[in-house]
């Protein structure tokens, strides 16, 4: 979908059952500042793959600021890069954008996932001002505490049948390729972007069941750590739910849905689906940052 420069009227955004707001561009270009949040959570960018929508993420980062940004795993896709090198300029620009934000004072915390597991050898280190940690406890502005993990350790396919995970990854790549062709046709016809692969996933009973089981296991892990919520990625399905007595937050991805999770200064969470340029929310909000707490190594339930 072509991204127009304009004003997004959040009052006209559509919210689905997962709490996702789809922002629609309905105005002309204005010289206003970026939206500012207390915290942004981004996961599953998959830099190094052909499915990565790096240009959209760059646009999003240009118009959204935060005191803290959590990179919740699978930012770089080491699996894909090992099999075939694909690193176009926009992918490099995303990395440089994160480093630039760190230099300018944004706190960046990187929680690696299974596709960027090579970074798990560097827990406790900093790269260009970006902290690499195994997992973290995020304290919200409202006092709630959240376990921040990528989530792959709670996916039995990844932990118990790694060969099947690789096979599934190839099938997913094929679905994304079909999705790309499908949306190229839609663009020629003047239709907006629509994720065929997401729709298919939600129509398959086993996939829906897997998502529910995944949420339940992570809720159990959050209770084990005596926190009120969990923030994760991994399954490419953005959601904010209060099921199982725990706040479950999933960041989604930048391959299919182009979503991020934002925490407002009062502790409210919002899923932003990036469909255009948001230019009309430039409040300068700089609350004090709580210390980062690293929790002990976690195990799959």
Image (spheres, rainbow, N blue to C red):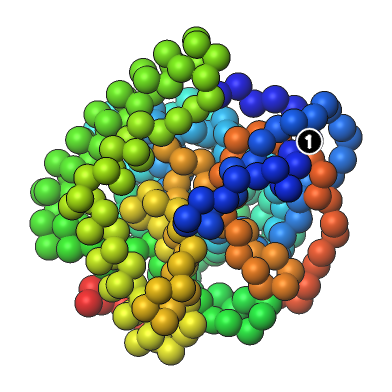
Which residue shows up at 25% across the image and 66% down it? 213
Residue 292, relative to residue 40: is it above or below? below
**Toward which corner of the image does residue 89 lie, by quadrant?**
top right
Query: Crowding near pointer 1: few (<14 within 10 Å), some, many (20+)?
Result: many
Residue 74: where, in percent of width, then height?
39, 50
Residue 228: where, in percent of width, then height?
49, 82
Which residue shows up at 80% across the image and 29% down it? 27
Q: Is residue 8 visible?
A: yes
Q: Is residue 81 visible?
A: no
Q: Is residue 159 left or right of residue 33?
A: left
Report the quarter where the N terminus lies: top right
Residue 117, relative to residue 255: is it above or below? below
Residue 35: where, in percent of width, then height?
76, 50
Residue 259: where, in percent of width, then height?
52, 47
Residue 255, relative to residue 217: is it above or below? above
SS under mark 1: loop
Comparing 270 with 227, the one in front is 270
Residue 295, relative to residue 1: is it above or below? below
Comparing 117 with 28, the one in front is 28
Report the residue that reaches farthest toward the top.
Answer: 188
Which residue shows up at 46% across the image and 73% down it? 242
Q: How many marks?
A: 1
Report the quarter where the C terminus lies: bottom left
Q: Is residue 213 left or right of residue 97?
A: left
Which residue shows up at 87% across the image and 40% down it? 32
**Toward which corner of the image does residue 198 lie, by quadrant?**
top left
Report the residue that reaches farthest toward the right.
Answer: 31
Q: Is residue 197 left or right of residue 164?
A: right
Comparing 152 with 181, the one in front is 181
Please name the residue that numbered disc 1 is placed on. 7
């Amino acid at each position: 979908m072509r991204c127009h420069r304009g004003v997004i009227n959040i009052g006209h955004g559509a919210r689905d059952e997962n709490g996702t707001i789809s922002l629609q561009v309905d105005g002309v270009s204005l010289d206003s500042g970026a939206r500012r949040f207390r915290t942004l959570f981004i996961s599953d960018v998959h830099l190094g793959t052909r499915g990565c929508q790096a240009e959209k993420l760059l646009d999003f980062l240009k118009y959204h600021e935060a005191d803290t940004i959590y990179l919740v795993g699978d930012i770089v896709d080491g699996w894909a890069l090992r099999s075939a090198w694909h690193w176009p300029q926009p992918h490099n620009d995303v990395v440089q954008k994160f480093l630039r934000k760190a230099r300018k004072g944004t706190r960046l915390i990187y929680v690696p996932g299974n596709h960027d597991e090579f970074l798990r050898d560097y827990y406790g280190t900093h790269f260009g001002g970006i902290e690499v940690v195994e997992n973290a406890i995020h304290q919200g502005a409202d006092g709630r505490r959240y376990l921040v993990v990528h989530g792959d350790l709670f996916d039995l396919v990844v932990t118990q049948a790694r060969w099947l995970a690789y096979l599934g990854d190839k099938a997913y790549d094929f679905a994304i390729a079909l999705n790309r062709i499908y949306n190229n046709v839609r663009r020629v016809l003047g239709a907006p972007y629509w994720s065929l692969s997401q729709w298919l996933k939600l129509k398959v009973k086993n996939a829906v069941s897997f998502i529910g089981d995944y949420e339940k296991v992570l809720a159990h892990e959050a209770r084990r750590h005596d926190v009120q919520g969990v923030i994760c990625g991994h399954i490419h399905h953005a959601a904010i739910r209060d099921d199982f007595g725990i706040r479950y937050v999933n960041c989604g991805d930048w391959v299919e849905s182009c979503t991020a999770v934002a925490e407002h200064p009062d502790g409210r969470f919002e899923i932003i689906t990036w469909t255009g340029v948001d230019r009309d929310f430039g409040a300068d909000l700089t609350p004090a940052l709580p210390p980062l707490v690293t929790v002990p190594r976690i195990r799959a339930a």
